[in-house]
Amino acid sequence: MPTLLILDANQRSALAVIRSLGRLEEVNIYAADSTIEAIGGSSKYCQKYFSHPPLSESPQAFIDWLRKILIEESIDLVFPVTEKSSQLILMHNESSDPVPVPFADYQTVMSLAHKGRLTKLAESAGVPCPESIHYNSALDVDFDETRRFPVVIKPCLSRIWQGDHWIDTVVQIANNKDQLREIITSSPWLQTNEFMLQEFIPGFGAGLFALYDQGSPVCFFSHKRIREKPPQGGVSVLSTSIPLDPVLVDNAKKLLGAAKWHGVAMVEFRVADDGTPYLMEVNTRFWGSLQLSIDAGVNFPELLYRITFRENLPESSPYKTGARLRWILGDLDSLYLVLKDPRYSWSEKLARLLSFFTPHFFSTRHEVNRLDDIKPAITELKQYIRDLK
C-alpha cells in the first residue's frame, strides 16, 4: 500500500489533493506543513500530520527534515503544492538523492516558470505573447526608450531563490514614464534580477488547466472566476466550470508539447479585444480552485497518481459545466472589501450583498466546508478568528 505525503497542508489546494487521494482504498495519506495544525491535516482522509521547519526561513532544515521523514515513514511519493516547496525539492534533487515527486525535472519546470525563458519558448512554438523587452537588471533600462504606456513590469520569477532564502516579487503596471522610473528604482528585486517590460494587453484573463504524461496530453479543464479577493482581481472565491476554448487548448498543446511537459500545469492567457489569446504565464503546480475540477469530473490528483504508478486510467468523459465552487471565508472578505470601498456605489454594494446571501443549493459546493469532512472547516475558522485579533 503506497504512502503519500502531501505538503503545504494548510493550502486549500492541498486539502483538495488529500480528499481526492484519500478516497482511494489502496493508499495511506500523510500531510505536513510548518503550522501546528492545518486544514488538510484535519481532514478525515489524513492518517498522520507532521509539522516541519518553515521552508521560507529554514529551507535547508526543511530539506533535512523531509529526507529524514521519507525514511522513517517509508514515504513512496511526495506531492508539493506550492511553488516554493516544489522548486526547492526539485533543485535539491539535482545534486543529491531525489525526493520522489510526480513532476518534471527542475530544468523543465524552470523553462516554464521563468517568464523570460517561457516567452522565448512560446515564440518558437508559435504561441502569441505580448511584445517584451528583457533586462538583466534595473541598470540596463533606458527610460527614454519606453514610449508606449501602460507597460507591465514583470519579474522573470515570481519567487527568487537566493541560496538560503526567497525573495517574493510582484507584477506592476506603469501608466507613464515617471511611474516606470519610480517602480523600477524602488523595487529591490529588480536591482539585481532579470525582468521584462511587456506590452499591456487590454482584455480579460482566461486560464486552462492541464495534465501531461511525459509530453503527451491527458486532460484539460477550464473555469471562470465570478468573484475574487480583492474584488478588483486576485484569488478566486467563487468560480464556475466552463467549456474548453479550442484556441486556448491548441496554444497550450503547442507550448506544453514543446516543453515535453510532465505533470500538472495552469496556463494563463489574456484575451485581447480582437479575440487573440496572449500567453501570460504558466503555474507549474496545483492551482487554488483545484476542488472545482474534481467536483466537475476531472480528478487531476488521482490521474496524476495513477500516471506516476503506471496504472490504467479511468475512462474519460466530458466534465460538467456550470458547477460552482465557493470559498466562503474568502468570499466574506471580498464582500467586506466591497462594502468599505468608496469606489463602489450604494447600488453596487447592495447587489453584492444580495448575491452573497443568495443560495445556489444545486450548483454550488463549498471548497472547505463539507459535511462529510467537516474538521477542515473548523480548523480554518479557528485560524480565521485568530488572525482577526
Image (spheres, rainbow, N blue to C red):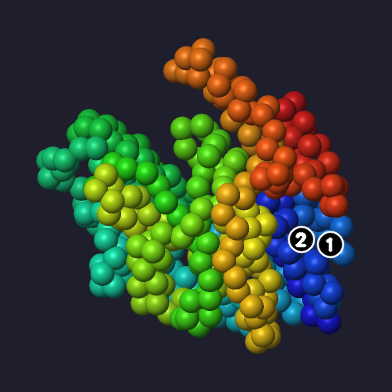
> How many marks overall?
2
246 sits to left or right of 382: left
Quadrant (top left/top right/bottom left/bottom right) for the N terminus? bottom right
Q: Amino acid at mark 2?
A: Arg
Q: Residue at x 47, y 37 (%)?
A: 233
Q: Residue at x 83, y 55 (%)?
A: 43
Badge 1 marks a residue whose secondary structure is: loop
Tell me if residue 115 comes above or below residue 180 in the rendering: below
Q: Residue at x 53, y 71 (%)?
A: 219
330 sits to left or right of 207: right
Asked which quadrant contains residue 69, the reply is bottom right
The residue indicated by pointer 1 is 45
Distance from disc 2 to disc 1, alpha carbons, whole Å, reads: 6 Å
CB contact under 8 Å: marks 2 and 1: yes
What's the mark number on residue 59? none
93 sits to left or right of 244: right
Q: State which tag comes first along the sequence, 2 or 1.
A: 2
In this view, which residue lies farthest toward the top? 346
Image location (x, y in percent) of residue 109: 47, 70
Q: Amino acid at mark 1?
A: Tyr
Image location (x, y in percent) of residue 210: 51, 67
What's the mark number on residue 19? 2
